[in-house]
Image (spheres, helix red, strand yellow):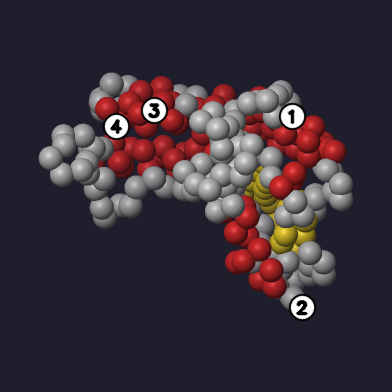
Amino acid sequence: MFERELAPPGQTTHGSCGADSNTLQFTLKHVTTKLLLAALGDSYSSGEGAGDYYPGTNAPKGCHRSPHAWVLQLSKYVANHDVTMPSLKYFLACSGALSGALKDSFKGQEPQADALKQLRPKPTLVTFTMGGNDLGFSSMLEDCYAFNCVSDGTLAKVEAKLSEEKKTLELDYKLLLSADRSATVVIVGYPRIFEDDKKCEGEPGTTFGFSRAEEKALNVLTGEADGTIAKAA
């Protein structure tokens, strides 16, 4: 996760954040009011797979917005519970979203940047996850699961898209900032898919699963994707 932590009461936090040579110095002031949260992005923010999707988002090809999504759990775990989402109209992330969902309608939803711009009261904290669908992670994982995405070159093809994706994300972030210039924007990366010390096997009696080489390569690729996101941010 590439983020700036909220300063604890009575303290000022300062330091640096960035990737490689792209490092910024920052000083965070004490937060005295609740931060109003808006969550934008793709399935990682919408809560795809978490279930109990809100009405209107639970169709097979819906946005699959779940009350169990991590963005709705923030208030439980942030110090003093000072992050809150005023209503579900601030929950704009949609499963399957590509970068184009910021400026174009996706799954019948208003463009996310337009919806953000219209929110009242204006959010003071905006979270955003994007890039996985641009790169084709879902299709790649299907290939890894059914075949071998390392030996057939599918993983390498996704990796080759990272440089161009950085340019796409830079434009995304500029669009977000123009939609709400007063908010703090937190760009969030993606989690590692596999644990280093465990192998993802198929069910007993089956022959499918991921090879150890695929698991390691997918973890490396996820790290490279997160590095690309950090550099763009």
Q: CA distance from mark 2 to mark 4?
A: 50 Å
Residue nearer the viewer, 45 or 229: 45
**Disc 3 crowd, CA 10 A, few/some/many (<14, 14-19, 20+):** some
Asked if the residue under mark 3 is in contact with the one under mark 1, i.e. CB atoms within 8 Å, the reply is no
Q: Which residue bears the numbered disc 1? A: 110
Residue that numbered label 2 is attached to:
10
Dot 2 alpha-carbon crowd within 10 angstroms: few under 14, some 14 to 19, many 20 or more = few
Q: Quadrant of the C terminus?
A: top right
Residue that badge 3 annotates: 140
Residue 42, quarter of the rendered image: top right
Mark 4, Cα crowd under 10 Å, few <14 / some 14-19 / many 20+, is some
Amino acid residing under circle 2: Gly
From the image, tell me which residue sits under label 4: 145
Q: Is residue 30 left or right of residue 49?
A: right
Q: Position of residue 79 (x, y in %)?
A: 66, 71
From the viewer's perspective, tell me whether residue 135 is left or right of residue 11.
left
The residue at the point 60 percent across, 66 percent down is 77
Amino acid type of the residue tagged 1 in the rendering: Glu
Kind of element beneath mark 4: helix
Q: Secondary structure at mark 3?
A: helix
The reply to whether discs 3 and 2 touch (Cβ–Cβ < 8 Å) is no
Percent position of residue 41, x then y? 63, 38
Q: Earlier in the sequence, mark 1 or mark 4?
A: 1
| Precedes in sequence: disc 3 or disc 4 | 3
Element on which disc 2 rests = loop
Could you give the CA–CA distance between mark 3 and mark 4, rounded to whole angstroms? 9 Å
- Residue neighbourhood size for the residue with mark 1, other residues' Cα within 10 Å, grouped as few (<14), some (14–19), many (≥20): some
Q: Nearer the viewer, mark 1 or mark 3?
A: 1
Q: Nearer the viewer, mark 2 or mark 1?
A: 1
Q: What amino acid type is highlighted by mark number 4?
A: Tyr
| Marks 2 and 1 close (CB-CB < 8 Å) | no
